[in-house]
Image (cartoon, rainbow, N blue to C red):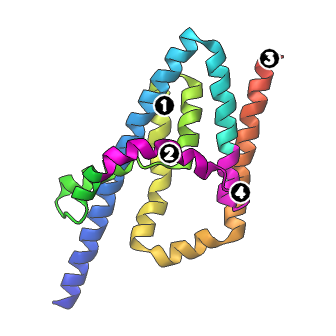
Amino acid sequence: IAAAAGQQAGEHRLRAALLFNLGRITSYTLAGGLVGLLGLWLQSQHMVFMLVLRGLAGLMLIMMGLYIAGWASWITRAEALGKGVWKFIQPLAQRRLGRNDPLSQFLLGALWGWLPCGLIYSTLSWVAANGDPIDGMICMFAFGLGTLPALVSATLLSTALAKILRNTKVRSFAGLILIGYGFWTWFALYQMFI
């Protein structure tokens, strides 16, 4: 009986983690479409703003890389921008905490997807700089899928995953990739002026 109860509890945790993350990815996808639409409008109306957005996207990627590598935490200041929106969303999310029904688990993830996060902001700035709502949705959907293994694993295997993510070599490597991509974004922007 204990084994059956343990298996059922494990299946429940897996279902809850998957529904939560499906909701989160849905929010990211929606945000990608909205930001891409804003970028498209800026591109058609104000090309200077698009160039500024590309520069900002590169800067955000570099700051995120520095943060992930553990070398600087400047990106956390950008997270303060979303705290005003989160004040309205947080009470709705808190009402869903602890509920076991599938709809509540999905909605909790969908609301959680709007939590202020520097990594999401840096990705959204890149999406806005591209100025394409469909590509923005695809990019943010892919971003959400890319974070899915880590977040589901964190829910189910938090101790083993935390050990890997604390490894300074892993963090430095991931940070260097983001920093390199940020500089590549700036280089591509520079090439537009040549």
At numbered mark 4, what does the secondary structure look like: helix, strand or loop? loop
Could you tell me if the residues under marks 2 and 1 are in contact, i.e. CB atoms within 8 Å?
Answer: no
Instruction: Identify the residue under disc 3.
Output: 193
Mark 1 or 3 closer to N-term?
1
Give the magenta part as a residue range: 62-90
Asked which quadrant contains residue 170, the reply is bottom right
**Alpha carbons under labels 4 and 2: distance apart:** 23 Å
Identity, as a three-letter code, of the amino acid under mark 1: Gly
**Alpha carbons under labels 1 and 3: distance apart:** 25 Å
Q: Position of residue 146 (x, y in %)?
A: 50, 51
- Closer to us: mark 2 or mark 3? 3
Instruction: Identify the residue under disc 1.
Output: 136
What residue is shown at x 25% (from left), y 50% (from top)? Answer: 92
Mark 2 or 3 closer to N-term?
2
At numbered mark 3, what does the secondary structure look like: helix, strand or loop? helix
Q: Position of residue 183 (x, y in %)?
A: 76, 39
Identity, as a three-letter code, of the amino acid under mark 3: Phe
Front position in the image: 31 or 7: 31
Locate residue 178 relative to residue 108 in the image: left or right. right
Instruction: Identify the residue under disc 2.
Output: 143
Could you tell me if the residues under marks 2 and 3 are in contact, i.e. CB atoms within 8 Å?
Answer: no
Locate residue 154 relative to residue 187 in the image: left or right. left
**Alpha carbons under labels 2 and 3: distance apart:** 30 Å
- Closer to us: mark 4 or mark 2? 4
Q: Position of residue 17 (x, y in %)?
A: 33, 62
